[in-house]
Image (cartoon, grey):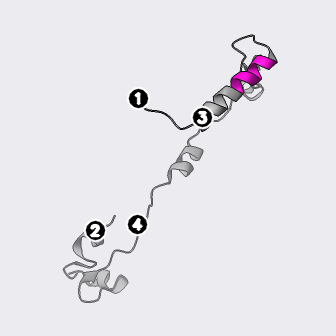
Amino acid sequence: MSISTFSGGRISVPPLLNSSASKTAPCSGGNLVIECSSRPNKKATAHHMKTRPRKSQPWDIRRKPTVYPPLPPLPPDWTVVSSISSDEIVEVASSIASSAQAPPTTE
């Protein structure tokens, strides 16, 4: 933010007494307008790219990435809990489906 946003746009400055300064930088009625900064700050990414650590040592330049052992296989998402036959599984599934279709009874 600049000062001009707080004060409404223009800042009143008294006229310069030195005649040589008024010749090089003319002012209109003693008013000065601030337009933009002469030294803007770096954005975050530009700053981090400029100040990032560099590999300058030969041992560091030749260094390879770390090799890790492969990960073990993931466990399955579904496991069978009981060891019942396939005929019993069909009977259980049909009884669950029929009870889900019947309206609930309240006592």
Magenta segment includes 90: yes
Q: Residues within 10 Å of mark 4 (few under 14, many from 20)?
A: few
Estimate the spatial distance between the alpha carbons at disc 3 and disc 2, rounded to whole Å. 71 Å
Camera-side mark, 3 or 1: 1
Q: Residues within 10 Å of mark 2 (few under 14, many from 20)?
A: few
Q: Residue furthest top?
A: 83
> Whole-percent x and y of residue 8?
25, 76
State which region is magenta: 87-93
Q: What type is the residue that disc 1 sits on?
A: Glu
> Whole-percent x and y of residue 80?
72, 16
Left or right? Give the position of 42 relative to 96. left
Secondary structure of the residue carrying tag 1 is loop
Estimate the spatial distance between the alpha carbons at disc 1 and disc 2, rounded to whole Å. 76 Å
Q: What type is the residue that disc 4 sits on?
A: Ser
Q: What label does residue 107 carry, if any?
A: 1
Find out whether the residues at labels 1 and 2 contact each other: C-beta distance under 8 Å.
Answer: no
Q: What label does residue 59 carry, if any?
A: none
Q: Which residue is mark 2?
A: 3
Q: Which residue is mark 3?
A: 100
Secondary structure of the residue carrying tag 3 is helix
First of labels 3, 2 by sequence position: 2
Q: What label does residue 37 carry, if any?
A: 4
Camera-side mark, 3 or 2: 3
For residue 37, above or below residue 30: above
